[in-house]
Image (tube, coloured by chain):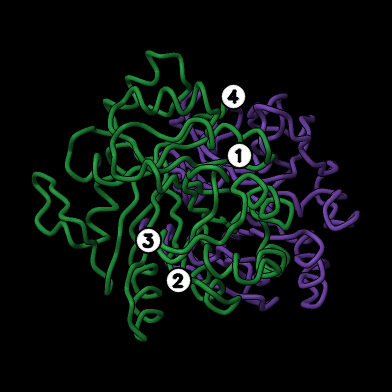
Chain colours: A purple, B green
Amino acid sequence: MEIAVINYKGGNVQSVLFALERLGVRATLTADHELIRSADKILFPGEGEAASAMRELRAQGLHELLPTLTQPFLGICLGMQLLGRHSEEGGGTQMLGILPFDVVRFSAAAEYKVPHMGWNTLQELRSPLFEGLREEDYVYFVHSYYAPVGEYTIAQATYPAPFSAAVQHRNFAAVQFHTEKSGPVGTRILENFLKL
Amino acid sequence: MLTKRIIPCLDVKDGRTVKGVRFEGLRDAGDPVALASRYAREGADELVFLDITATNQKRATLVALVRDVARELDIPFTVGGGIGTVADVEALLLNGADKVSINSAALARPELIDELAARFGSQCIVVAADARYHEPEGWQIYTRAGTHNTGFDAVQWCREAADRGAGEILLTSMSNDGTKDGFALDITGAVSRAVSVPVVASGGAGSMQDFTRVFQQAHADAGLAASIFHFGEIGIRELKEHLRADGIPVRL
């Protein structure tokens, strides 16, 4: 199985590569269109800032390639937000537009610090990605922006209102939390993805 | 529901864990990777590695350590200790650190926080602040392992750090550190109210009740400790069960 991990200088890529290594699978970190197109599965990790990530994707022509992919695709964290239409981050940023959501910022309140950082529970799980998981299992989040709940939502978390912890449209699935840093629960999700 | 985090802190020197860690069944307690994995299995929510190496080879050792830990560990970890430049931070993040904490370098040149946040995102930039209480000034920020008073007010400095883009504040009370009399509830509460980013409380943990207090009374988002975990005085799991019984959300 060929797994392509999209390289757009999105940070935190090494942790995802190590997580795959722990599962005994080999992955290629690449921005090469041919390698990406021919891969069996695509991982699209990311941490950092939306506008600079989009600039890098455009510079490599990936903003045109990614929406055309048909193999199983998993976005992680910023890699999920980038699949939306628009983000408030970076003074307003056009995203890839693969899924019909707009990314907005959490409003800080006394008991609700921003970034939303730490272990939170998952609800309303509905995807083969979550096979073997239970409602209220814990995963690790670090983010200041989020995608609202919509018909594309396949898992929710709450902070303080429900938001999309995971989304899916066709072959494009994505999670807001860090599967590679979420202990055995995160590992199970990665395994499930590799089995898709 | 977002849980309160329990964070063991490991001191490392020349790539080895120090501070006489006593763990039954752990063949090499000086091996940061073995120790980190052990804590992860016990239910630690995150780990902090504090590098206390004082040599020129420091950078290379620390980067290698980060890589080894990241290869094995499936929970987040922060690396701190003598980190001073954008290049330092980049090397650590590229090799798998989730967050990097800066301390003296941020006090010497606060713009460093803005630069790091713009480059890597706030979520991975932790500002570590060491505070000490004395009359009549109150809580002030110290550097150089707590020996040098900067004259900065602790709450003001933490607020500035957050405003400049720190994604988290790691607040250590030098007045409480090592006492086992409990966390500094007053300054932790004051900083937690003053900033809108998460606050990790550190220094003084001696009992499970100390953690309950720092979460309930000082609204800390995470509690960090070293020796009580390393010496096996408090187990991570029993601590979390205690906190849950006290009505505090934890991951169990």
Three-letter amino acid code of the residue under disc 1:
Val
Cβ–Cβ under 8 Å for marks 2 and 3:
no
**Marks 1 and 2 share the same chain:** yes
Three-letter amino acid code of the residue under disc 3:
Leu
Three-letter amino acid code of the residue under disc 2:
Gly
Residue linked to disc 4? A123
**Marks 2 and 3 share the same chain:** yes
Read off the chain for label 1: B
Q: CA distance from mark 2 to mark 3?
A: 9 Å
Locate residue B182, reporting x and y percent. 36, 31
Query: Disc 3 or 1, which lies upstream in sequence?
Result: 3
Task: Bin the neighbour count of mark 4 within 10 Å (Cα to Cα): few under 14, some 14-19, many 20 and up.
Answer: some
Q: CA distance from mark 4 to mark 1?
A: 32 Å
Please state which of residues B121 and B21 is positioned toward the viewer in this rendering.
Answer: B21
Locate residue A156, reporting x and y percent. 65, 29
Locate residue B162, reporting x and y percent. 68, 51
Identified at 38% across, 81% down, the residue is B60
Residue linked to disc 3? B50
Cβ–Cβ under 8 Å for marks 1 and 2:
no
Residue linked to disc 2? B82
Q: CA distance from mark 2 to mark 4?
A: 41 Å
